[in-house]
């Protein structure tokens, strides 16, 4: 049972999400589904970040009334992964938006969302 | 001019010349005797006259014997070394091969066969001579180096023999080329031919076998006769 | 030896060789005729023929190279004579060694080609197709003959550690058993077979191939040119025979010995020719690639270890 | 089928990579590395109560700049991709279903409130959870609402891009001021740190967050507007 | 100096401001953007100059005023300065190039472009790994966006695939970063290096994830389909940026992050690099799309760089130099080629023939391709040299083979492409139009390549000695290419003679001999150039380039100089050869064999260098590391030039199809370069070294077989020049055999052959070339009877074939005589017999040559041809006089040569007694032979002329023809398939085994490429699969294994 900590659950969920994402974009033919898989993948990494930051029984890294500012070190979780997660989320947003736009463009050309139809470039 | 252009031009001209051949209503001439044009590598056009361009355009000259002892000696040598052109012109050529057999053996008289007129000094006109063959005989005879001798074998060469009224054979050989020795008969036996050789040797040794010079001297006359009998004269006038 | 004396000897030797060549030719024809039961030509026929050819009154020329053909041919023959030690007298600078550099083998083998080249070119300018065919055949056969011949010659060169004919002949002096024929039988056998091709009699007479391609290279030649070529032919035939004699049969100590040996060598090829019909070119070439080639290889193997 | 099995095996491989990572997990008890440093010193050094904000805006300010750039890039790319070949087909106007009464009415009330809330979130980014990105996103949601309520209304691209530009230049300018006035690019100590935990504190962080908030809001808006203006397929 | 942070601040500031500035109009916006790029480039340049002068030390730039790892820091050192400079320069030039697209497109494109360049700068400079991740995402996004600059179905697909792939890769990187932080508590790269992650449990996998993602960014084979699609479909201006700037930056990232991993990773990076290098170059073979081809090449080059990176411990101090050389060449060349492809607008490789309509573009393209392949004077040449030297020096011969094999593959497709450009059919193609703003960047990178090449050479001790004056002369000739032939020819000849005048006093006898052949012979060959009219555009620079190379190898005092000259000569001769009408495939096989040979040579020289500190030519005398193999490799290198059997298939076509006056250059002169090399290396091996007996024995047999098979092949040629070409193969075989004998006589024979072959093959090729110019065909059966029209040509050919056949008294015999003496002394009897037979066969084909061309029947269309041009006759007759002199007075040349050879082979000398040469087997005298044969000949000739003085001159059809007349000259001339009978007998020797072998090899390669590239099915999903498979397999190999 020693492995069944909240942190490890976070890790496991993150990894599983990532694996589901990979499974998705390796098997799904629909481009939208691939993008969703990517979003899953991305979310998995965010979850990992949060899990990395987690320390049992601590609070968010904001020094307000609930945190003793002198003893903050022992009361808050790691702020760095949170910052990274923020950045990663924004990046993921940008990429997802772009992917959708590209899909839109592709759909205009062939009226299909099947990725296997777009094989004009090869070899 | 590039190679491509050249090829194109040549093929065009070929097509034209074929068209010309079809259109012309001339008598039959061999295609290779037609006037034709070729394209030179620099693109200029060369006109070819096949009956004229390829052949030396000069009459044979008279080469008179010098006389004296030297000439006699040389005549002896010529007489003892008669090289006969291996060219069977008619039916009598069947009588020539036995001469090399042990029974007749012409070698002992210094007579032997040569395959090329350049190296021969005797020519056996064997039997009837068709007009068609006459062309070849004339060319061959003119190509032989002087002094050269003609042996006419069989009656047909004398007066046409049994073909005296044939449309395609000649009646008198010596209207067309000078003859040194006539061997009469139809056909004469090989022994007669051998006798002809002996006679020829005598003539040569006596310095009387100068028919080559006679031919050169009366060349125009001979040529006129030849052209009269050969209707389709499609050969150069002078053969070398 | 004084150069003028040497020149005199050489000229005399040349005279002998030319005449012997013609006589040898006549003799061979005589032998052939007798075998066929004929009387045959008189012995003096070649000289008469030569005389007649020199005495033609008209002659033609196809151009400059046409002239040069017989010239090359005759100089090739005479040169071959000059570079060949004829009679072994025990001295390097002896009377009958000509201008031979002790008979350098490489020189002789390459100089053989000189005459052929001239002939080939002269005939070529004649423009007669049969000439060209004859030459093509002749050169091809020459190259094929050289295979066993070179193998054997190299073997002899190894055997005596020299490329000088003079030294090879010197080494064969003494007893008949010193001849290469006995000391190096494979090489001798290869050469004896190669000789057939080199001397150009039936079955290897496809160069001239009478009645097939007229007379081959000489088709367009007449009169004086032909005379030159006949002379050259006589010299070359003797010189080929002398080469083989020097290489295999112990050379000659006197002109008589030379005449006898060269006659026998020449007769060997005529003798074979009497029996066999003409080869086609590819048959001729492949023939040299078979037995003579194997013999030549054996000859080298025998002396290279 | 074979392909799926193959991919499954492949996933097992990837999983094994992850497994060997997690095999080493021990439960974390203490902060370590820079996280510990920030927990100990950030409040003093930067005066920001929200440590994440301190990290995001100052310590890792360059990342944030990059982040903003990514959004900016996305909006720019969307802008030009979606505007491609738009010209020349003005006649086929977009047709929208009219918005419902409730939506229209509610939006009139809600939009100002959402705007104010967004502004609040990014202005208080150094004190409470939130910040420029979050605030910007909230502002953008107000725009979504307005678009939903009035689909046929046009929002001026030029206006959005002007705001975007001004905010961006402001951000960069604040960064450069950091070099001039303080000790490095994006240093927030160009102004007094102020009293810890009050609104006017943490140096330039609120200023920067205002720019970020405006910028993010404008960028998201421009993305949305661009997507909205895309003509129907077919 | 301007703080590097302003690269970011200015770029981003302007990018953000474009929203406002854009209102001022397109032109202003573009100007602002370009000036920003210029400013960024200026900052990098400023720093680069400071670092270059050595005064500046590496600087850290701290953001937010805190030291790392607290905050993100950037680093500006020499490497960063260099790489940012490269990125910014190509950004600026690319921006200029793209002006027309910028004008058409929305202003947002400008923003994206600027942000892309900024992002590249940051990923180079940053020392924070998460920051790296962010800016790598910026780069990916902006590239994916810019793909849409040229929007169509293909680019949309490529953009999507690219985006999906890079985001998955980035995801992997992010996971790695997360756990790196988790294990170490820091994000700073320097800290990560210091913590030595691999020692931590689980750290290995973190390192794996980080590195594999960055490697995947470098597009390793085969997980790179997405990148190729982008290369193919994007607008060329973007391709240039991706290939030159983005790849450069990504490479720098790898080199920076690699330190986290530690040394055990180096090997794997090299391995992945090797697979990528070989794999993508292999697939390049099947490409017919120019941009995709460039993509393959770019990826291949990155693979090469990865190999080098993996060897940085072994390369040590030389690493930056090697990387710089290869990277910079790739960078300039690839940018230039992509831009060029945008100007030329030809998709298919074959359509690039259109470039020929603007010859100067051909020059640019050639510059780029040669730089890519690593020809001098470009930086990649020096880099490759150093790389091979160091790799061999450390015993990594396998890697040398990999590097050289991959380069070889690359050369194949690049030169095939170049071949299409030079020789392809272009009449149906429309001329492309040129915009000034597109021209300028191409020009700048081309010139920069030369300049950087010069500086690269100066940078090292070895390179600094190289003489660039001949190259400058080439440049001058290139500059005056618009002048008429007469002027250029005079200048070229004068230049060569002047060079000879300055050089010859310093040369020893062997070198002098070859220098005379190369330079004096070359000048003579150039005389024939006066016969050409017009400009003869492009001929003189390349001819002089070849001669520059030739004289370079003679004057070389170091192996580098030698190799430098060798490559110049190869390049020049390639251009010369490919000038011929139908010479495209032959030019290709020539250059490929040459490059193959050059690589063998390079490897050999590398092995020779082991254990020596200098690069002097004397290291060849004492090879310590695997000497037999080293000598064998060097010899193989030279044998490709002498066209030894097995390596000869390029020669017949190359020499046969070359221009009339080029054939003598490439045959009589160029082939001697290989001989010169062989002489040098065999001298080095030493006369009495039993160690190499097998080598020389094999060489001897190779020579002998070359002799015989060359002759046999020559026998059955219908093309006059091909016949001569095969004859050259055979003759070179003699030389190789003679040298392999390794005795005094053998070498003397070989040198005699060198001189002879120069003389007669020069005359033959020159004459036949002149004849071909007149009659317009190469086929012998289409000629005939030309003696009537071209007596001068006939005499020249007659004399030289007598010499060539080795018939006494001309000089060919001297060679043969020495040769057989040497062979018998050595005991190589069978070789001797083979060569003897071959000279019989030589006689056959020579007869055929002279007969079918000059004798026999004159063809109708040649009735009016003139004799060969006077300008061709001059060199021919000069050399004829030389040939006759050498024939009759061989001692004038052979005696000094013998003395010289006696240095190396003191025993078994040829002794001279006056004009008589005496060996142990016999003696012989050239002059006596000449006098004897000459006098007999003249005597007989005079007699004949007198006796036939009245001969009647007849014409061509006056032949005995069985009483008939020939019909046409064509049917009377015995010329076609003359040796049919011989063929029936020896057809077995004419089976083109070698050609079949090489064809099979190439087919195998192409089939493999054709099969392998099906991997790139075009399905974006499968590309993803490749990435995942790549990750898993690499994981299994590196960690799991």
Image (tube, coloured by chain):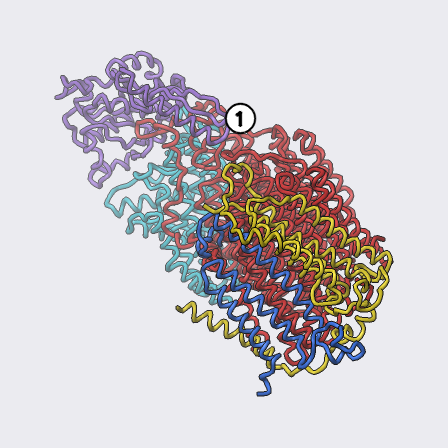
Chain colours: A blue, B purple, C cyan, D yellow, E red
Quick one: label 1, few (<14), some, or many (20+) residues within 10 Å? few
Q: Position of residue D117 (x, y in %)?
A: 68, 59
Measuring from the top left, give residue D87's x and y in whole percent: 56, 38
Is E14 left or right of E348, judged from the image as shown? Answer: right
Q: Quadrant of residue D196?
A: bottom right
Q: Nearer the viewer, residue E283 or E710?
A: E283
Q: Nearer the viewer, residue E749 or E279?
A: E279
Which residue appears at 44% of the width and 56% of the height?
A114
Figure check: E55 above or below B41: below
Q: How many marks?
A: 1
Residue E984 in the image: above or below residue A20? above
Give the position of the C terminus of chain E as an image quadrant: bottom right
The residue at which mark 1 appears reads as E866
Asked which quadrant contains residue A11, the reply is bottom right
The residue drawn where x is 65% and y is 75% is A52
Q: Nearer the viewer, residue E415 or B117?
A: E415
User: In the image, residue E440 lies at what x, y percent?
Assistant: 69, 40
Residue E986 percent coordinates (x, y): 39, 52
Is residue E606 visible in this depiction of the protein? no
């Amino acid at each position: 049972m020693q492995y069944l900590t909240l942190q490890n659950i976070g890790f496991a969920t993150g990894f599983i999400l990532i694996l589901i994402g990979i499974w998705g974009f390796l098997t799904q033919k629909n481009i939208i589904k691939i993008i969703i898989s990517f979003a899953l993948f991305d979310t998995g990494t965010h979850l990992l970040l949060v899990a990395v930051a987690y320390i049992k029984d601590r609070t968010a890294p904001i020094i307000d009334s609930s945190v003793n500012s002198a003893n903050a070190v022992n009361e808050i979780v790691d702020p760095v992964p949170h910052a990274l997660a923020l950045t990663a989320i924004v990046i993921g947003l940008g990429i997802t938006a772009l992917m959708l736009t590209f899909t839109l463009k592709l759909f205009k050309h062939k009226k299909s969302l099947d990725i296997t139809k777009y094989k004009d470039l090869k070899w | 001019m590039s190679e491509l252009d050249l090829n194109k031009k040549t093929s065009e001209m070929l097509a034209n010349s074929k068209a010309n051949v079809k259109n012309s209503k001339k008598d039959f001439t061999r295609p290779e005797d037609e006037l034709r044009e070729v394209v030179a590598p620099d693109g200029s056009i060369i006109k070819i006259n096949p009956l004229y361009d390829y052949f030396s355009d000069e009459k044979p000259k008279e080469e008179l014997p010098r006389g004296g002892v030297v000439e006699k000696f040389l005549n002896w040598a010529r007489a003892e070394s008669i090289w006969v052109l291996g060219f069977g012109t008619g039916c009598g050529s069947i009588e020539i091969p036995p001469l090399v057999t042990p029974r007749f053996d012409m070698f002992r008289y210094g007579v032997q066969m040569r395959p090329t007129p350049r190296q021969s000094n005797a020519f056996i006109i064997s039997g009837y001579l068709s007009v068609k063959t006459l062309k070849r005989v004339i060319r061959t005879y003119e190509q032989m180096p002087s002094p050269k001798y003609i042996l006419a074998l069989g009656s047909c060469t004398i007066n046409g023999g049994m073909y005296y009224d044939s449309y395609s054979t000649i009646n008198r050989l010596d209207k067309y080329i000078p003859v040194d020795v006539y061997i009469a008969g139809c056909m004469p036996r090989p022994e007669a031919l051998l006798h002809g050789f002996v006679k020829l040797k005598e003539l040569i040794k006596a310095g009387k076998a100068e028919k080559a010079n006679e031919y050169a001297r009366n060349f125009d006359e001979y040529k006129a006769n030849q052209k009269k009998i050969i209707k389709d004269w499609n050969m150069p006038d002078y053969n070398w | 030896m004084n150069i003028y004396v040497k020149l005199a000897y050489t000229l005399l030797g040349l005279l002998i060789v030319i005449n012997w060549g013609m006589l040898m030719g006549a003799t061979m024809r005589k032998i052939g005729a007798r075998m066929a039961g004929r009387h045959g030509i008189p012995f003096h026929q070649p000289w008469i023929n030569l005389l007649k050819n020199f005495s033609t009154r008209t002659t033609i020329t196809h151009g400059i190279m046409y002239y040069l053909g017989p010239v090359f041919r005759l100089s090739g023959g005479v040169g071959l004579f000059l570079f060949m030690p004829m009679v072994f007298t025990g001295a390097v600078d002896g009377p009958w060694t000509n201008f031979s550099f002790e008979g350098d083998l490489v020189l002789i083998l390459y100089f053989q080609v000189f005459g052929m080249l001239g002939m080939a070119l002269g005939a070529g300018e004649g423009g007669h197709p049969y000439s060209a065919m004859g030459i093509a055949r002749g050169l091809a056969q020459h190259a094929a003959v050289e295979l066993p011949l070179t193998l054997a010659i190299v073997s002899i060169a190894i055997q005596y550690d020299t490329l000088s004919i003079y030294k090879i002949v010197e080494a064969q002096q003494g007893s008949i058993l010193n001849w290469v024929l006995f000391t190096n039988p494979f090489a001798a056998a290869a050469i004896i077979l190669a000789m057939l091709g080199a001397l150009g009699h039936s079955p290897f007479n496809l160069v001239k191939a009478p009645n097939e391609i007229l007379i081959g290279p000489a088709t367009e030649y007449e009169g004086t040119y032909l005379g030159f070529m006949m002379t050259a032919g006589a010299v070359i035939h003797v010189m080929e025979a002398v080469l083989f004699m020097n290489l295999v049969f112990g050379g000659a100590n006197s002109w008589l010995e030379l005449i006898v040996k060269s006659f026998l060598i020449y007769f060997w090829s005529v003798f074979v020719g009497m029996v066999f019909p003409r080869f086609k070119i590819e048959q001729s070439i492949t023939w040299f690639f078979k037995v003579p080639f194997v013999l030549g290889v054996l000859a080298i193997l025998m002396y290279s270890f | 089928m074979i392909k799926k099995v193959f991919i499954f095996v492949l996933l097992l491989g990837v999983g094994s990579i992850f497994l060997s990572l997690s095999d080493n997990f021990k439960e974390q008890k203490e902060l370590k590395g820079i996280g510990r440093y920030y927990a100990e010193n950030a409040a003093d050094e930067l005066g920001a109560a929200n440590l994440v904000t301190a990290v995001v805006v100052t310590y890792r300010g360059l990342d944030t700049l990059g982040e903003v750039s990514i959004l900016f890039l996305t909006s720019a790319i969307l802008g030009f991709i979606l505007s491609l070949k738009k010209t020349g087909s003005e006649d086929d106007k977009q047709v929208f279903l009219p918005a419902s009464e409730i939506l229209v009415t509610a939006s009139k009330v809600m939009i100002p409130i959402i705007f104010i809330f967004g502004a609040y979130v990014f202005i208080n980014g150094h004190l409470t959870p939130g910040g420029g990105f979050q605030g910007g996103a909230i502002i953008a949601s107000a725009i979504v609402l307005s678009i939903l309520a009035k689909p046929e209304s046009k929002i001026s691209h030029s206006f959005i891009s002007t705001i975007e530009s001004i905010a961006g230049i402001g951000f960069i300018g604040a960064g450069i001021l950091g070099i001039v006035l303080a000790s490095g690019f994006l240093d927030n100590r160009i102004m007094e740190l102020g009293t810890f935990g009050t609104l006017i504190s943490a140096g330039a962080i609120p200023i920067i967050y205002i720019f970020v908030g405006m910028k993010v809001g404008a960028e998201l808006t421009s993305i949305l507007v661009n997507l909205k203006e895309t003509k129907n397929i077919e | 100096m301007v703080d590097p942070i302003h690269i970011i601040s200015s770029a981003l500031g302007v990018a953000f401001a474009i929203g406002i500035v854009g209102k001022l109009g397109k032109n202003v916006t573009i100007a602002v953007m370009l000036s920003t790029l210029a400013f960024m480039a200026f900052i990098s340049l400023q720093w680069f100059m400071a670092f270059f002068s050595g005064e500046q030390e590496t600087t850290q730039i701290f953001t937010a005023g805190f030291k790392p790892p607290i905050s993100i820091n950037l680093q500006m050192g020499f490497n960063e300065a260099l790489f940012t400079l490269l990125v910014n320069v190509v950004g600026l030039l690319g921006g200029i190039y793209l002006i027309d697209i910028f004008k058409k497109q929305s202003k947002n494109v400008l923003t994206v472009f600027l942000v892309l360049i900024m992002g590249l700068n940051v990923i180079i400079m940053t020392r924070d790994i998460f920051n790296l991740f962010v800016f790598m995402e910026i780069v990916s996004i902006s590239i994916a966006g810019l793909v849409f600059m040229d929007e169509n179905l293909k680019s949309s697909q490529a953009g999507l695939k690219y985006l999906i792939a890079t985001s998955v890769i980035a995801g992997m990187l992010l996971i790695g970063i997360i756990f790196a932080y988790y294990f170490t508590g820091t994000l700073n790269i320097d800290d990560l290096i210091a913590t030595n992650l691999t020692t931590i449990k689980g750290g290995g996998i973190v390192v794996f994830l980080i590195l594999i993602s960055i490697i995947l960014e470098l597009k390793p084979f085969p997980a790179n389909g997405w990148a190729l699609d982008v290369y193919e479909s994007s607008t060329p201006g973007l391709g240039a940026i991706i290939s030159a700037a983005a790849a450069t930056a990504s490479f720098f990232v790898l080199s920076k992050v690699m330190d986290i991993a530690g040394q055990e990773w180096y090997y794997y990076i090299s391995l992945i690099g090797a697979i990528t290098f070989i794999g993508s170059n292999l697939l390049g073979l099947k490409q017919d799309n120019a941009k995709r081809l460039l993509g393959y090449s770019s990826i291949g080059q990155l693979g090469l760089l990865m190999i080098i990176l993996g060897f940085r411990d072994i390369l040590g101090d030389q690493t930056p130099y090697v990387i710089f050389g290869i990277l910079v060449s790739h960078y300039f060349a690839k940018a230039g080629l992509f831009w060029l492809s945008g100007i030329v607008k030809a998709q298919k490789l074959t359509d690039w023939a259109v470039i020929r309509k603007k010859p100067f573009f051909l020059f640019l393209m050639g510059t780029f391709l040669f730089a890519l392949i690593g020809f001098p004077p470009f930086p990649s040449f020096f880099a490759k040299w150093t790389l091979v030297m160091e790799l061999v020096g450390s015993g990594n011969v396998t890697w040398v083979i990999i590097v050289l094999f991959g380069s070889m593959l690359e050369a194949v497709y690049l030169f095939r492409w170049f071949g299409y450009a030079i020789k392809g059919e272009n009449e149906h193609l429309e001329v492309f139009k040129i915009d000034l703003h597109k021209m300028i960047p191409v020009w700048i990178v081309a010139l920069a390549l030369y300049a950087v090449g010069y500086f690269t050479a100066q940078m090292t001790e070895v390179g600094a000695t190289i003489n660039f004056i001949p190259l400058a002369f080439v440049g001058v000739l290139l500059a005056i290419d618009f002048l008429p032939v007469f002027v250029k020819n005079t200048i070229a000849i004068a230049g060569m003679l002047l060079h000879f005048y300055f050089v010859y006093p310093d040369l020893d006898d062997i070198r002098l001999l070859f220098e005379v052949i190369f330079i004096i012979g070359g000048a003579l060959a150039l005389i024939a150039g006066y016969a050409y009219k017009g400009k003869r555009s492009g001929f003189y620079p390349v001819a002089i380039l070849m001669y520059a190379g030739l004289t370079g190898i003679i004057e070389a005092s170091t192996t580098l100089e030698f190799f430098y000259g060798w490559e110049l000569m190869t390049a020049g001769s390639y251009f010369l050869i490919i000038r011929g009408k139908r010479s495209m495939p032959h030019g290709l096989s020539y250059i490929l064999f040459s490059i193959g040979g050059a690589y063998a040579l390079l490897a050999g020289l590398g092995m020779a260098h082991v254990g020596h500190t200098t690069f002097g030519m004397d290291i060849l005398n004492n090879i310590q590391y695997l000497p037999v193999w080293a000598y064998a490799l060097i010899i193989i290198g030279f044998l490709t030039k002498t066209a030894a059997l097995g390596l000869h298939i390029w020669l017949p076509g190359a020499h046969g199809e070359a221009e009339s006056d080029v054939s003598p250059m490439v045959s009589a002169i160029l082939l001697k370069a290989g001989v010169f090399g062989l002489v040098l290396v065999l001298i080095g091996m030493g006369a009495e070294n039993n160690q190499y007996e097998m080598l020389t024995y094999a060489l001897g047999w190779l020579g002998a077989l070359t002799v015989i098979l060359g002759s046999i092949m020559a026998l059955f040629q219908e093309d006059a020049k091909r016949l001569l070409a095969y004859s050259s193969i055979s003759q070179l075989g003699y030389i190789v055999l003679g040298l392999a004998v390794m005795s005094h006589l053998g070498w003397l024979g070989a040198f005699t052959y060198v001189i002879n072959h120069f003389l007669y093959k020069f005359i033959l090729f020159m004459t036949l070339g002149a004849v071909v110019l007149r009659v317009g065909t190469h086929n012998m059966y289409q000629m005939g009877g030309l003696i009537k029209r071209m007596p001068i040509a006939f005499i020249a050919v007659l004399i030289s074939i007598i010499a060539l056949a080795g018939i006494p008294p001309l000089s060919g015999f001297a060679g043969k005589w020495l040769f057989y003496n040497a062979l018998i002394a050595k005991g190589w009897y069978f070789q001797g017999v083979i060569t003897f037979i071959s000279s019989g066969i030589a006689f056959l084909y020579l007869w055929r040559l002279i007969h079918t061309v000059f004798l026999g029947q004159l063809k109708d269309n040649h009735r009016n041809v003139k004799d060969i041009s006077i300008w061709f006759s001059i060199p021919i007759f000069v050399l004829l006089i030389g040939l006759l002199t050498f024939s009759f007075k061989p001692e004038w040349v052979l005696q000094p040569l013998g003395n010289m050879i006696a240095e190396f082979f003191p025993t078994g000398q040829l002794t001279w007694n006056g004009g008589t040469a005496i060996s142990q087997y016999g003696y012989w005298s050239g002059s006596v032979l000449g006098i004897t044969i000459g006098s007999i000949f003249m005597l007989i000739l005079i007699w004949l002329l007198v006796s036939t003085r009245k001969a009647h001159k007849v014409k061509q059809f006056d032949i005995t023809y069985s009483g008939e007349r020939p019909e046409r000259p064509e049917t009377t001339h015995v010329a076609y398939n003359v040796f049919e009978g011989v063929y029936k007998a020896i057809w077995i020797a004419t089976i083109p085994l070698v050609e079949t072998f090489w064809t099979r090899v190439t087919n195998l390669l192409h089939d493999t490429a054709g099969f392998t590239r099906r991997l790139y099915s075009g399905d974006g999903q499968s590309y993803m699969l490749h990435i995942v498979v790549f990750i898993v397999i690499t994981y299994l190999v590196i960690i799991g294994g």
